[in-house]
Every structure is written in C-alpha cells, then in structure tokens.
Amino acid sequence: MHSQSEFLKQPPNRTPFVLQVVGYKNSGKTTLITKLILRLKQAGLLVGTVKHDAHDFDMDKPGTDTWQHQEAGADITAISSASRSAVISRRPEPLSVLLGHMQHADIVLVEGFKQEHYPKIILLRDTNDCELLSLTNPYMAVMWPQAEPIRMQAAVPVFALDEEARIAEGIFKNLTPRTTK
C-alpha cells in the first residue's frame, strides 16, 4: 500500500483522476463514495464529488437570499463566503462542465452519469445487474454478498462492498506519485 506521503496534488496543468461509481438505485453508490472519501482524505488528497440525480432536487433552503433569487427567476445564482462557494443553475450541466469546477482536485468521484467515458466502479446487487459490466471503461466491480457468482464471470477485478480498503488501494495505483524536487 502506498503511504500518504507518496502522493502529490496534481500539477495545475493536469486534470484530476475522474472515477465514476455507477449502479442501480439503492446499490450502495453513496455509501461507497463516502467511505472512499474518508480513505482518500486520510491519504492527504483533495477530493471532489459530482452526483447525478435522476429526479429534481432542491439545494437551497426557502427564505434564504439565494432561494429568493432563484424564486424570482434567476437562471444562475452563485454564492461565496470565506469558507465555501456554490453555483445553482436552472439547467442541467454536462459532466465536463461540472468537472471544470474541480481542476484543483486530485481525484473526482462521480456518482452516476453511466454513459460517460471515465473509469467506473460498477456496483452489482445480483446477477441481473451484470448488464452494467458492458458500460464503457469498467474499472472494477463491487458486489453485494448475494452476487458471489459474478466474481467468476467478470473480466474486471471484483470486490465485496465492505472491502473499501482494497478498492482504495486500486484507486491509489492510478494517482500521480510524489516527485522529489
């Protein structure tokens, strides 16, 4: 396993490593991503996340100034404070645009966006989900216990859902090692 001192934040002219986590509803995508964030942060990495929501979502709270801006009809609203920033837009953005906001990250974990062409961790609950293995750029598969027969069929490494340490190790192999200068 790499030590956290072996990793370097990506140089400014380099894009972050983008890794998608895909699966059907309730497959454990968010649970796995939160576990991976903790592991990656422990290694000293800057971690970005992007989530695709198949439904409409509401990020702003009623009554706040930015909510009032959106309710009045603003097409795009930004807010920034001393510790954080956010942009709310009234249109869907392609993943490429969202990733453009994360160029300073070492790694971006993307939940969803199945048809994009980045390496993917594919979550499989049972053998019916195996069709997901035909998506572009499968990187590894993560399975639920009842999906054990998948391990023998898959052409990619297969891990159990609770093996986040081994999954993180597979991710570390794709990150830029520190250079000594």
Image: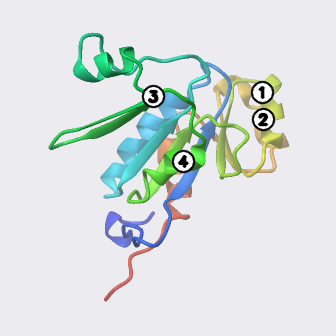
Comes first in the chain, label 1 or label 3: 3
Which residue is depicted at the point 38% across and 82% down? 179
State left or right for residue 35 relative to residue 54: left
Say what amino acid the circle numbered 3 marks.
Asp
Q: Residue furthest top?
A: 62
The structure residue drawn at horizontal position 45% and vertical position 42%, both measured from the top left corner, is 49
- Residue density around tag 4, few if under 14, some if 14–19, many if 20 or more, within 10 Å: few
- Mark on residue 129? 1
As displayed, is residue 162 above or below residue 12? above
Residue type marked 2:
Leu
Q: Secondary structure at mark 1?
A: helix
Q: CA distance from mark 4 to mark 3?
A: 16 Å
Q: Residue at label 2?
A: 132
Of tags 2 and 3, which is closer to the observer?
A: 3
- The answer to whether the residue labelled 1 contacts the one labelled 2, judged by CB atoms less than 8 Å apart, is yes
Residue 73, picture quadrant: top left
25 versus 10 height, above or below: above
| In-image side of 157 versus 57 (left or right) | right
Dot 1 amino acid type: Asp
Which of labels 2 and 4 is toward the front? 4
Q: Which dot marks residue 75?
A: 3
The residue that disc 4 covers is 97
How far apart are labels 1 and 2 at the CA level?
A: 6 Å
Q: Position of residue 51 (x, y in %)?
A: 52, 33
